[in-house]
């Protein structure tokens, strides 16, 4: 038997949860004025090398990179921001006016060690607000991420924010970090030994060496006046909007492109892989990719993690069930049952038997599927065109014409948990 690749999932039983989550995320994004962008699943490898940064874990060891038949180096996208920015530059989206507000939903690929909440093909929802350097933009993005989680019904999460400074103040901070970590170097994990030279900021969010990060110098003490002012304004605006947050100076994010504001949302109901979303400001990514300087801010949310959190918080939607199941009493009534089912399926969620089941087992199947109503089509009903409508929830029965049934079902429409808006 050929099995699926390790770290990937088949979405079968819970595809309705995905549909529900995606609907909610699309709906919140649109309310914030964001429109959807769908970029290709694979891109030129160069995009991620330049966009994400050669010193990051993603580019160093996690990318699915291969040569295609034309000898080009191709990479399955490990994240969504660089592709969106590539599209922004390629289609000169700035000519349509700024800011451009885009969101995406789709699979990402990283060669990571699979474990609970960590996959090789996972899905992200993300949003990018392109073209504003103002703190209001940071706050709009942060609030969108928070509201998206709230719209799904999640409550047990924490927002942590920090500033990583800019090209003016960050070098001084990096020097201070190097000084601090130098004597600790022999005690650090293998990855951090390498990160020390390549990407010193990453030492702060290493889980293995977390004890050293606690007493490390903090970036907030090194911010230049402009970065300080920007960060203060972000905090003030979040306060004004009544958004709960915590300042966490150890948040630096793994990607090279962040400047100033960075944030993470963690779930308090998840274990080790508790990060639900992460994001921040990236003022130089677009020029890195050959566009004009266009300050931007965005985030990405892990959809599988969100679904685990929904399960933990018992906020998963009910499995959708048919509103009505049309039962044929005898074989002679099957064509009529089928035509009633097709007629009703123009407006309702309908099931009928296509397995040649006897009446009793059609009823059993209707219960198993959780059908709210059953329409019984027998010899009598064929003649009179008045059908028995049985409410499977309370057992009551009425005799109605097809148009009366339709009216009744319409009144009951809100009962179907497929109608989740
Ligand atoms: P990142 O792009 O690394 O900032 O990740 C953003 C979010 O995507 C994280 O907070 C996680 O929720 C999710 N995520 C990242 N990597 C994985 C993975 N390998 N498997 C599942 N979810 C992931």
Image (cartoon, helix red, strand yellow):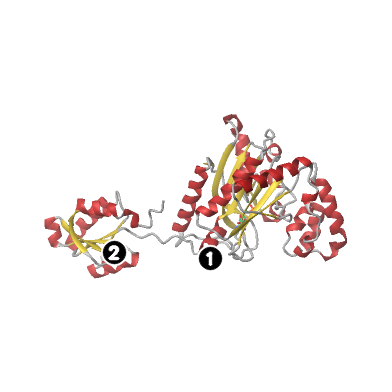
Nearest the eye: 183 or 211: 211
Could one spot residue 334 in this view of the protein? yes
Tell me the residue at 50%/53% (across/down). 151
Q: Earlier in the sequence, mark 2 or mark 1?
A: 1
Nearest the eye: 168 or 235: 235
Q: Which mark is residue 89?
A: none
Residue most toward the top? 95
Q: Which residue is mark 2?
A: 355
Nearest the eye: 79 or 414: 414
Q: How many marks?
A: 2
Figure quadrant of residue 331 = bottom left
Tell me the residue at 64%/65% (across/down). 272
User: In the structure shown, which secondary structural element does the residue marked by tag 1 occupy?
Assistant: helix
Give the quadrant of ligand 1. bottom right
Q: Position of residue 329 (x, y in %)?
A: 19, 65
- Horizontal side of residue 198 vs 91, given as left or right: right
Q: Position of residue 16 (x, y in %)?
A: 44, 57
Q: Position of residue 277 (x, y in %)?
A: 61, 54
Q: Position of residue 374 (x, y in %)?
A: 25, 62
Under 8 Å from ligand 1: the CB of mark 1? no
Q: Which residue is mark 1?
A: 312
- Horizontal side of residue 254 vs 197, given as left or right: left
User: In the structure shown, which secondary structural element does the residue marked by tag 2 occupy?
Assistant: loop
Nearest the eye: 8 or 183: 183
- Horizontal side of residue 301 vs 349, given as left or right: right
Tell me the residue at 76%/57% (across/down). 204
Tell me the distance, in whole angstroms, between the alpha carbons under discs 2 and 1.
38 Å
Tell me the residue at 63%/62% (across/down). 273
Dot in front, 2 or 1: 1
Q: Is residue 96 above or below residue 329?
A: above
Could one spot residue 46 in this view of the protein? no
Figure quadrant of residue 47 = top right
């Amino acid at each position: 038997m050929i099995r699926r690749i390790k770290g990937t999932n088949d979405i079968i039983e819970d595809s309705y949860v995905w549909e529900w989550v995606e609907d909610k995320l699309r709906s919140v994004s649109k309310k914030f004025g964001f429109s959807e962008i769908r970029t290709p699943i694979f891109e030129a490898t160069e995009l991620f090398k330049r966009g994400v940064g050669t010193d990051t874990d993603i580019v160093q060891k996690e990318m699915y990179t291969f040569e295609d038949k034309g000898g080009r180096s191709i990479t399955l996208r490990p994240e969504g921001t660089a592709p969106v920015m590539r599209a922004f530059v390629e289609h000169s989206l700035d000519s349509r006016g700024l800011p451009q507000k885009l969101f995406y939903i789709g699979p990402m690929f990283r060669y990571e060690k699979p474990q609970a909440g960590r996959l090789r093909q996972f899905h992200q929802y993300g949003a990018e607000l392109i073209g504003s350097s103002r703190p209001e933009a940071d706050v709009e993005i942060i609030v969108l991420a928070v509201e998206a989680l709230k719209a799904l019904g999640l409550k047990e999460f924490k927002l942590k924010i920090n500033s990583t400074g800019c090209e003016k103040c960050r070098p001084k901070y990096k020097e201070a970090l190097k000084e601090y970590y130098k004597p600790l170097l022999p005690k650090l994990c293998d990855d951090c030994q390498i990160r020390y030279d390549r990407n010193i900021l990453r030492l702060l969010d290493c889980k293995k060496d977390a004890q050293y990060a606690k007493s490390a110098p903090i970036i907030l003490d090194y911010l230049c006046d402009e970065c300080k002012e920007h960060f203060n304004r972000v905090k003030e605006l979040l306060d004004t909007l009544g958004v709960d947050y915590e300042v966490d100076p150890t948040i630096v994010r793994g990607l090279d492109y962040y400047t100033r504001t960075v944030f993470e949302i963690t779930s308090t109901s998840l274990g080790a892989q508790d990060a639900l979303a992460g994001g921040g400001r990236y003022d130089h990514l677009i020029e890195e990719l050959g566009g004009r300087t266009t300050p931007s801010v965005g985030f990405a949310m892990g959809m599988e993690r969100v679904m685990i959190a929904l399960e933990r918080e018992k906020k998963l939607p009910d499995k959708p069930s048919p509103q009505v199941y049309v039962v044929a009493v005898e074989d002679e009534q099957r064509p009529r049952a089928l035509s009633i089912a097709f007629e009703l399926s123009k407006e309702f969620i309908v099931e009928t038997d296509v397995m040649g089941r006897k009446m009793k087992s059609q009823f059993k199947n209707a219960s198993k599927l959780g059908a709210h109503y059953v329409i019984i089509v027998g010899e009598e009903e064929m003649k009179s065109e008045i059908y028995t409508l049985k409410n499977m929830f309370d057992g009551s029965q009425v005799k109605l014409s097809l148009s009366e049934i339709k009216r009744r079902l319409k009144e009951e429409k809100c009962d179907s948990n497929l109608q989740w808006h």
